[in-house]
Image (spheres, rainbow, N blue to C red):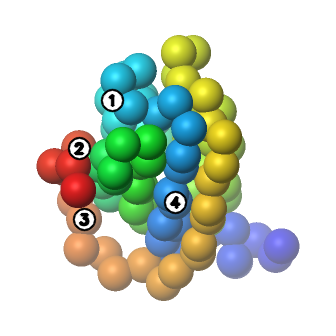
């Protein structure tokens, strides 16, 4: 991937399934997003899923995806879906949203 693509602001949308609820997963995702300087949100979906939307530089988002797919120590990620989308610039922080 060329350097201009890596520095371009993009959005990643993730759905993560497994033991990802009740193990500090959302707080972990929020913390990693904050530490990496990303904006977006995380929320529980159903009984075994977490949805994440984050915006930032592509190279930073790629690192973020790796961290989310690993999760905190008590978590177990069985399945993850990652979609790349155009950034909207609508987020100004990284927040935990209400569950769906």
Separation of residues labelled 4 and 1 (CA atoms): 16 Å
Q: Residue at x 40, y 61 (%)?
A: 53
Separation of residues labelled 1 and 3 (CA atoms): 18 Å
Label placed on residue 90: none
Label 1: state its secondary structure: helix
- Work out whether residue 35 can be spotted: no
* Residue 42 relative to residue 84: left or right: left
In primary-sequence order, the first of circles 3 and 2 is 3
In primary-sequence order, the first of circles 4 and 3 is 4
Q: Residue at x 31, y 75 (%)?
A: 89
* Residue 99 relative to residue 32: left or right: left
Query: Where's the C terminus, which quadrant?
Result: bottom left
The tally of labels here is 4
Label 3: state its secondary structure: loop
Which callout, 4 or 3, points to the residue nearer the camera? 4
* The image quarter in which residue 62 lies: bottom right
Question: Which residue in the rendered view is the most extreme toward the front?
Answer: 47
In primary-sequence order, the first of circles 1 and 3 is 1
Q: Residues within 10 Å of mark 4 (few under 14, many from 20)?
A: many
State yes or no: discs 2 and 1 in contact (Cβ < 8 Å): yes
State yes or no: discs 4 and 1 in contact (Cβ < 8 Å): no
Q: Residues within 10 Å of mark 3 (few under 14, many from 20)?
A: some
Percent x, y of residue 52: 41, 55
Q: Which residue is mark 2?
A: 96
Q: Which residue is mark 1?
A: 27
- Work out whether residue 96 can be spotted: yes
Q: Residue at x 52, y 80 (%)?
A: 85
């Amino acid at each position: 991937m060329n350097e201009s693509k890596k520095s371009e602001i993009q959005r990643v949308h993730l759905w993560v399934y497994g033991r990802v609820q009740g193990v500090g997963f959302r707080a972990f995702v929020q913390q990693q997003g904050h530490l990496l300087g990303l904006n977006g949100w995380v929320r529980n979906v159903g009984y075994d899923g977490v949805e994440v939307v984050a915006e930032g530089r592509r190279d930073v988002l790629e690192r973020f995806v790796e961290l989310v797919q690993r999760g905190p120590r008590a978590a177990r990620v069985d399945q993850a879906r990652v979609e790349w989308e155009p950034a909207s610039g609508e987020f100004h922080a990284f927040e935990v949203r209400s569950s769906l």
